[in-house]
Structures are given as structure tokens and as C-alpha cells.
Amino acid sequence: MKGRFITLEGCEGVGKSTQLRLLAEYLNREGVDTVFTREPGGTPLAERIRGILLDEALVVSPYAEAELFATARRDHIDNLILPSIEAGKLVVCDRYIDSSLAYQGVARGLGIERVYEINSYARDNCMPELTIFIDMDPANSWRRQKGKEVMHDRMERESAAFHAACYRGYKEIAAREPERFALIVPERDKTATHLKIVEALKARGIV
């Protein structure tokens, strides 16, 4: 029996990491055989590429950036995601192709269709059946509300206009594929947000 594949997406500072932790705790309690992974990353090669992509000392052109993400993604698909699905596991990935569409396609200005072309291998062979999008404008993120502007890497240090464009990109992609997306408006109570995510998984028969 084949496993399942879902992704979590969201802009910077909206509580995605917290929700991934709560989801991991829930799935562990429920006894669901789950592989948690991330992008860029998840395999030794992809983690090396992650280091390049997030290195603040480097200047990377938008097209090269998109290509690097796609290369890391292909290795991730072949060496972790698909084998795990074939083994009957639930794969939960922190970011995936929709991040590339929003960040490089919209915010970097390459265009969604061009980034889809660059990621044709993922689009043709390994798309998630459900994408949970934490639907919060980065201008109002929890991080900003708390006055904690933590900037760990090259992406997080981009301008407010860049992150606003990422959010618009996500909303556009979700409108194109409403059957795949579950838009979760986060609550101040992180447990309430978690319960919304669990309900979305239950609605798809994933848990």
C-alpha cells in the first residue's frame, strides 16, 4: 500500500515551524508512520545546496536560484520522498514546489509558468495531494507583532515588498489549484490553528 504526501507552506514568521512541531506530536500519538522533511534539503546533496541558497555572502541570480531549488528538489524526490511513499509512509514536507512558484516565480519575477517548467520533474512525478497554507500576510506575522525581526538567512533578509509578493504568489497558486490547497487562517491560540490543520487532514482521509 502506497503512502501519502502532503506539504506545509507559509510566509516568514507566521508560525509554520510551531505547527509542524504540533503536527509531528499529533501523528506520533496517533501512530502514523511519518517522514518529516524540508526544502531545500532532506538529502545530503539537497542540504549542501540549501547551504548555498541561504548563504548571505552569495549573490545568486533569480534563474540560477530557481534552478538550484529544482536540482535539490529532484534529488529529494528520488532519494527520500518517492521511496518513503512507496514504503507506505506519510511524507510531510516543510515547503515544496509552491515555495519556488511564490518566491522565484512571483517575488523574483520569473513567472509562475517558467518556474513550473524548471520544476517539470516534480510537477509530472511527485505532487502533494494536500498543501496546507498558513494564510497570513507577512506584514502582520506573529514575528512582526512581537517585534522580533529574526533574520537568519538570505531569504529572510529580503525586503517587505519581496515578502508581500510571496504572499500574493501563494494566494494566486491556491486560487489556481483550490482542490489541492487548504488555506488555514492562523489563530492567536496555536492549538486552535493546529486543530484546523488536523481537520483538513481528516477531511482528506489522511489521518
Image (cartoon, rainbow, N blue to C red):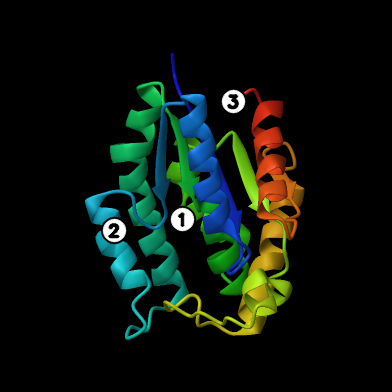
For residue 206, the mark is none
Q: Position of residue 76 (x, y in %)?
A: 34, 46
**Mark-to-mark CA distance, 3 and 1:** 33 Å
Res 109 → quadrant: bottom right
> What amino acid does circle 3 point to?
Val
For marks 3 and 2, the one nearer the N-term is 2
Residue carrying label 3: 207
Q: Is residue 143 left or right of residue 183?
A: left
Is 66 above or below relative to 162? Answer: above
Along the viewing direction, whichever of 194 and 129 lies nearer the viewer: 194
Q: Is residue 88 left or right of residue 123?
A: left
Q: Quick one: SS at disc 1?
A: helix
Residue carrying label 1: 118
Residue carrying label 2: 47
Q: Is residue 161 left or right of residue 19?
A: right
Q: Position of residue 105 (x, y in %)?
A: 58, 65
Q: Is residue 127 visible?
A: no
Along the viewing direction, whichever of 72 and 146 lies nearer the viewer: 146
> What amino acid does circle 2 point to?
Glu
Res 7 → quadrant: top right
Is 111 above or below relative to 186? Answer: below
Q: Quick one: SS at disc 3?
A: loop
Q: Position of residue 24 (x, y in %)?
A: 48, 41
